Amino acid sequence: MLAPMQGLTNRAMRALFIDWVHPDVVFTEFMRVSNVSRKCLKRSDLKEISSTRGNVPMVVQLVGNNGKALVAAVRNAEAVGASHINLNMGCPYGRMTTAATGGAMLRHPELLTELIPALRAATTGTFSIKLRAGYDDPEQIFSLLPLFENAEVDFLVLHPRTVTQKYSGTADHNITERVVRETHLPVITNGDIRTAAEGRRILRETGAAGLMLGRGAIADPLLFERLRTHRAKEPTEAETSAMLHRYLRDLLTRYRELFCG
Ligand SMILES: Cc1cc2nc3c(=O)[nH]c(=O)nc-3n(C[C@H](O)[C@H](O)[C@H](O)COP(=O)(O)O)c2cc1C
């Protein structure tokens, strides 16, 4: 899966990945769900949602904390074609943490007891959650698994760092391996996958249902291809250079269209 990345994985970037390397699943950037506005999703968000391409499933990611507003946003998103909804419970930055949305939701797990089943019930297609291992305790996820299972969440995407850790240190895929053992829910694992060899090792050692690529894919879209074709060999410097030229030229053409020249 191509990771959701705010400011990056807009419809131009997603289309580039789909045309080049056909990820099995792509995600939108997170869409903020307003607790106050009647129109819970912005017009620009609705445009992103209606821009699915080819036959690659696109997951619409929402960030918010108000049950009613989130349920309304799910309906809003489904009305313009969304089939897969994801709740962001991992983002460690800015407004996300002050308003107890994103990763800060893990600081208030009591709020999740009603919210998660309500979102599952409101979503016609799949409903998944993307989260960190915990707010400041990497073991926190284990206490949340029964809630996710009882709510019949379709799958989890785990970035095994804590929220307070932000991007420091490394993703601890031992946590992923334990989560996979403990739950029957499919777990997609994410974090610090930069080479095909590493991706394959993590998949094998954790038993995860799949991988999600973020920064590694942005640096090198062909990582998807190397993982899929089981070609462990990393590209030479000349191959990387040629790929980057082609990548940036292609992206520039697509950005000209998206951002009106
Ligand atoms: C620039 C940037 C923007 C991001 N935006 C989002 C986002 O909108 N939603 C989300 O769930 N995660 C977001 N993330 C986190 C990534 O999806 C991913 O979980 C994280 O980067 C770890 O994976 P990686 O090591 O493969 O990059 C973002 C990360 C980066 C670097």
Image: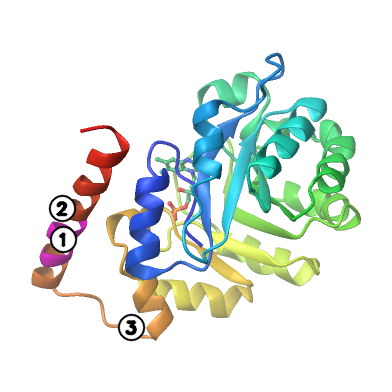
Report the residue marked by disc 1: 246
Q: How many marks?
A: 3
- Whether 136 is drawn above or below 150: the answer is above
Q: Identify the residue shown where x is 45% and y is 38%.
A: 6
Q: Identify the residue shown where x is 33% and y is 83%.
A: 232
* Residue closest to the far bottom: 230
The magenta-colored residue range is 242-247
Task: Say what amino acid the circle numbered 2 marks.
Answer: Arg
Report the residue marked by disc 2: 249
Counting residues from the start of the chain, the first of labels 3 and 1 encountered is 3
Q: Quadrant of residue 137?
A: top right
Task: Say what amino acid the circle numbered 1 marks.
Answer: Arg
Foreground label between 2 and 3: 2
Colouring style: rainbow
Foreground label between 3 and 1: 1
Label 3, residues with CA under 10 Å away: few <14, some 14-19, many ≥20: some
Report the residue marked by disc 3: 232
